[in-house]
Image (cartoon, helix red, strand yellow):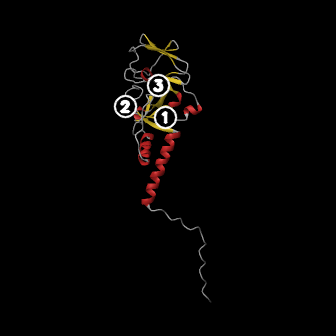
Amino acid sequence: MPEESSPAPPAGKPKKKQLPFWIELPMLIGIALIVAVVIKTFLFQAFFIPSSSMEDTLQIDDRVLVSKVSYVIGDIEQGDVIVFDDPRGGFEQPEEGALESMRRNLLESIGLSAPQSEFIKRVIGLPGDTVEAKDGELLVNGVVQVEPYRKQPGKPIPDFGPILVPQTELFVMGDNRFASQDSRYFGTIPIDTVVGHAFVIIWPPSNWTGL
């Protein structure tokens, strides 16, 4: 009796050839960098606190998470902590190559370095408000403000104003009124320079809290 031949294995899809590790790793790093830059540009970024101007709310080296969509779907409110572009003008970004730019954006997006041209302060006056300090008290539209977040809340602040906030601008101040360069020095800031709303401390874990 003739010997039966074994059936041929079913034809399947050809197995994809895996890329060598030395090619795959740079590709993965490149994709991660691109994703980080996209997220930082359009959605969220971590912001590194470089100074004492927002103490005791924010400490030096804290990292806060900044939402870039909050004010796309909602309005800025008095008391919000915001990140905004340097209002002093004349700031020139140093020239950098594509790789250096991606590296900087990655470090800024995860809060490992402070953005080179952005500030973080609290919104005190909205468009149309009148802001002033009188007899050591902060007043908005003639009403004395209760500010539990302020460092040394019982210490009188130097008088200024009254200042009428223009319709497309904001008056901002640091919570540490005695160590803050803010609207008392550089004036009100245009709303269109606001980067986003700082809404939570994410590092260190011991300082985790909403803002």
Q: CA distance from mark 1 to mark 2?
A: 17 Å
Q: Quadrant of the N terminus?
A: bottom right
C-alpha distance separating marks 3 and 2: 16 Å
Q: Which residue is mark 2?
A: 60
Q: Which residue is mark 1?
A: 66
Under circle 1, the secondary element is strand
Q: Earlier in the sequence, mark 1 or mark 2?
A: 2
Q: Residue 53 got which mark?
A: none
Q: Residue furthest bottom?
A: 1
Q: Residue at x 37, y 20 (%)?
A: 178
Q: Position of residue 20 (x, y in %)?
A: 45, 62
Which of pointers 1 and 3 lies earlier in the amino acid sequence?
Answer: 1
Q: How many marks?
A: 3
CA–CA distance between discs 1 and 3?
13 Å
Which residue is at 39% across, 38% downward? 113
Q: Position of residue 29 (x, y in %)?
A: 44, 52
In this view, the residue in front, 12 or 129, is: 129
Question: On the rendered structure, is 103 left or right of 193?
Answer: left
The image shows residue 148, relative to residue 107, as above or below, that is above
Q: Position of residue 11 (x, y in %)?
A: 60, 71
Circle 1: residue type: Val
Q: Is residue 138 visible?
A: no
Which badge, 3 or 2, is on the more N-terminal residue? 2
Residue positioned 46% across, 53% down in the render: 28
What residue type is disc 2 on? Answer: Ile
Residue receiving disc 3: 122
